[in-house]
Image: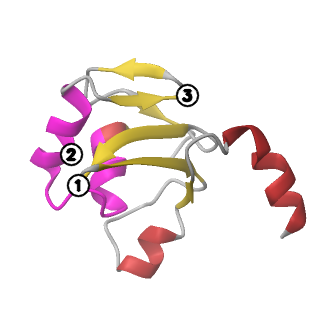
Amino acid sequence: MGGTMRLDLFLWYVRIAKTRSIAQGMACDGHLRIDGRAIDRAHAPVRVGNILTFAHHGAVRVLRVEALPLRRGPAPEAVACYQELLAGETANVSQQAAER
């Protein structure tokens, strides 16, 4: 499948958004960031290693993309595609990975 995936598909496949149209809205509203850059289009490319930051249900979520899913599978498969980070934790990502 290559090294990138559309942002809206990623959000839908990993079950961050219930529907693809909700995922498209999240991507287009300008409140989602990939590696610190504001995104305003659903077709923005997502790669393994990208950091996604966005507001979700009243909280700020920070995710690191670990894998690009091939489908919208069951929840355990979806959660394996990203790692939840705490805000301000992105600088220590490599150290955390070494500890595991």
Examine the residues drawn in magenta and state their main secondary structure.
helix
Which residue is found at the position 47% from the left and 39% from the top? Answer: 52
Give the label, 3 or 1, closer to the camera: 1
Q: Specify the label residue 23 is tagged with.
A: 2
Q: Amino acid at mark 2?
A: Ala
Q: Nearer the viewer, residue 84 or 25?
A: 84
Is residue 12 in the magenta section?
Answer: yes
Residue 49: x and y, percent?
64, 42
Q: CA distance from mark 2 to mark 3?
A: 18 Å
In the picture of the structure, the residue carrying the numbered disc 3 is 35
* In the image: residue 75, left or right of residue 86: left
Number of callouts: 3
Is residue 84 in the magenta section?
Answer: no
Label 1 neighbour load within 10 Å: few <14, some 14-19, many 20+: few
Label 2 with label 1: CB-CB less than 8 Å = no
In the picture of the structure, the residue carrying the numbered disc 1 is 57
Label 2 neighbour load within 10 Å: few <14, some 14-19, many 20+: many
Which residue is found at the position 89% from the left and 59% from the top? Answer: 98
